[in-house]
Amino acid sequence: KLRKDGGGGGGGGLESPLGPGVSVLSLTTAINVPDRDSPNSILARLSRLALTAQTNNRKGVQDLVTETALELLRQKDAIVSADSQYSHFRRTTEAEREFNSLSIGGRSKFTEETVTNYGGQQKKQRSPYRSVDAHPRATVAIVTINLCIEGDSTRISKIRNRIELQSALSRIASD
């Protein structure tokens, strides 16, 4: 959906190399994970990315988003479902409000977060679901990328197939 805000105070119009305004997007994937305890699972790789990211600067956040999108692209055959949302705003304040709403809405669905890295402040908790037996434990991982980015070049359409998912992940990784 495309939404343009009227003029007025509070974070006026914005022009960047990626186009006018500010885009907010959310991309959610469901990924089959044959062994969630494996150090090579998508869960472990994303955890390592989150813990090593430099989220206290713009370049570090950009690298985290790029690497996360690339990890999802590498798992494309294991992805069983995907969904996306997109909104575009002229005013930064409206975009930030939408981004915060998406982020809080997603985070509130879980009783706890095992890895948090925001503004350079890291927190890791041991997952209560770690397997203690020798048998691999399969699961489906839900991975969501919420992104607030200057411009409109990262516009993604509603995901309807694998080609559109790959296109959206590639666009996220490159912008």
Image: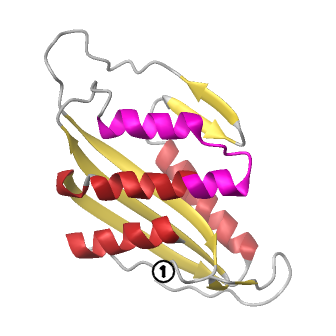
Q: Is residue 161 visible?
A: no
Nearest the viewer among 77 and 138 is 77
Q: Main secondary structure of the magenta part?
A: helix
* Res 136 quadrant in image: top left
Q: Tag count in the figure? A: 1
* Res 76 quadrant in image: bottom left
Going by the picture, which residue comes out furthest to the left?
135
Pointer 1 local density, CA inside 10 Å: few below 14, some 14–19, many at least 20: many
Nearest the viewer among 63 and 163 is 63
Q: Is residue 26 left or right of residue 31?
A: right
The residue to which callout 1 is attached is 155
Which residue does the image show at 70% across and 33% down from the upper left? 121
- Residue 145 location (% of width, % of height): 47, 56
Q: Is residue 142 left or right of residue 115?
A: left
Chain part drawn in magenta: 41-63
- Residue 17 location (% of width, % of height): 67, 84
* Res 88 quadrant in image: bottom right
- Residue 135 location (% of width, % of height): 13, 17
Which residue does the image show at 47% across and 53% down from the upper left? 67
